[in-house]
């Protein structure tokens, strides 16, 4: 069983942590985040760091102990370094274009999709020069990159998942939007049988 909740958190340089009435507010160069801690845990600043403690030893308290510690850790990392998810667009005729703070996607539908990010999220769209496959041949299908950046880890992941949902990778032709580290297992079609 993990004991992650006992590990103290160090506060990075340039980050300010405030605690009032179970609400933790973290301010740093990348932004400001806040979270209301569960009633089962306590908060204490000690030796230039943060310690999350649990009030009692019930199962619920043990669960919330590690969870709240991880959430506060992600807040500290988010406001100091930020989080990023990278997406790739693969498919002939598929493209992405940066328009202001949003992106315009052409994904083979009869219409284009304009996506405007929520507050606190930055989206950067790029067109690749040429990506080379493992065997040295250029990948003609890779038509765009999308970077989703922000301080809130949960919101960055949610926005990246929303963009990916516009065209989930096809398991027969490998076309669609995928995470840069995602592997799509290609199925054999009827002709392979």
Image (spheres, rainbow, N blue to C red):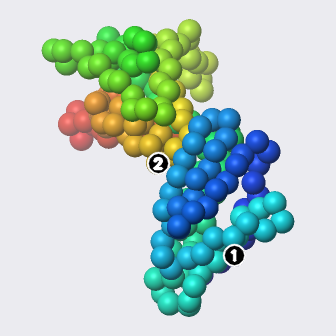
Residue 191, position as x, y percentages in the image: 23, 33
The residue most toward the front is 20
Q: Mark 2 or mark 1: name the one nearer the start of the chain.
A: 1
Residue located beneath label 1 in the image: 6
Residue that badge 2 annotates: 154
Residue 71 percent location from the top left of the image: 55, 59
Within 10 Å of disc 1 (Cα), the crowding (few <14, some 14-19, many 20+) is: some
> 93 or 13, which lies in front?
13
Can you name the residue that lies furthest to the right here? 47
Left or right, 60 with reference to 18: left
Q: Residues within 10 Å of mark 2 (few under 14, many from 20)?
A: few
At mark 2, the secondary structure is helix
Q: Is residue 142 above or below residue 4?
A: above
Q: Which mark is residue 163?
A: none
> In which image quadrant can residue 151 be found?
top right
The quarter in which the N terminus is drawn is: bottom right
- The residue sitting at 49% across, 12% down in the picture is 127
Residue at image position (24%, 41%) is: 193
Marks 2 and 1, how far apart at CA: 23 Å
Indicate the secondary structure of the residue bearing disc 1.
Answer: helix
């Amino acid at each position: 069983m993990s004991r992650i909740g006992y590990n103290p958190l160090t506060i990075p340089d340039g980050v300010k942590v405030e605690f009032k009435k179970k609400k933790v507010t973290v301010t740093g160069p990348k932004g400001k985040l806040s979270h209301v801690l569960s009633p089962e845990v306590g908060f204490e600043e000690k030796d230039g760091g943060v310690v999350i403690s649990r009030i009692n030893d019930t199962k619920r308290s043990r669960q919330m102990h590690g969870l709240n510690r991880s959430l506060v850790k992600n807040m500290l990392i988010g406001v100091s370094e930020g989080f990023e998810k990278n997406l790739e667009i693969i498919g002939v005729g598929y493209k992405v274009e940066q328009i202001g703070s949003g992106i315009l996607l052409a994904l083979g539908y009869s219409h284009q999709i304009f996506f405007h990010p929520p507050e606190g999220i930055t989206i950067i769209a790029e067109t690749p020069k040429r990506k080379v496959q493992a065997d040295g041949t250029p990948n003609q299908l890779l038509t765009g990159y999308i970077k989703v950046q922000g301080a809130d880890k949960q919101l960055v992941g949610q926005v990246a998942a929303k963009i990916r949902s516009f065209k989930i990778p096809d398991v027969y032709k490998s076309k669609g939007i995928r995470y840069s580290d995602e592997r799509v297992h290609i199925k054999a079609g009827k002709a392979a049988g």
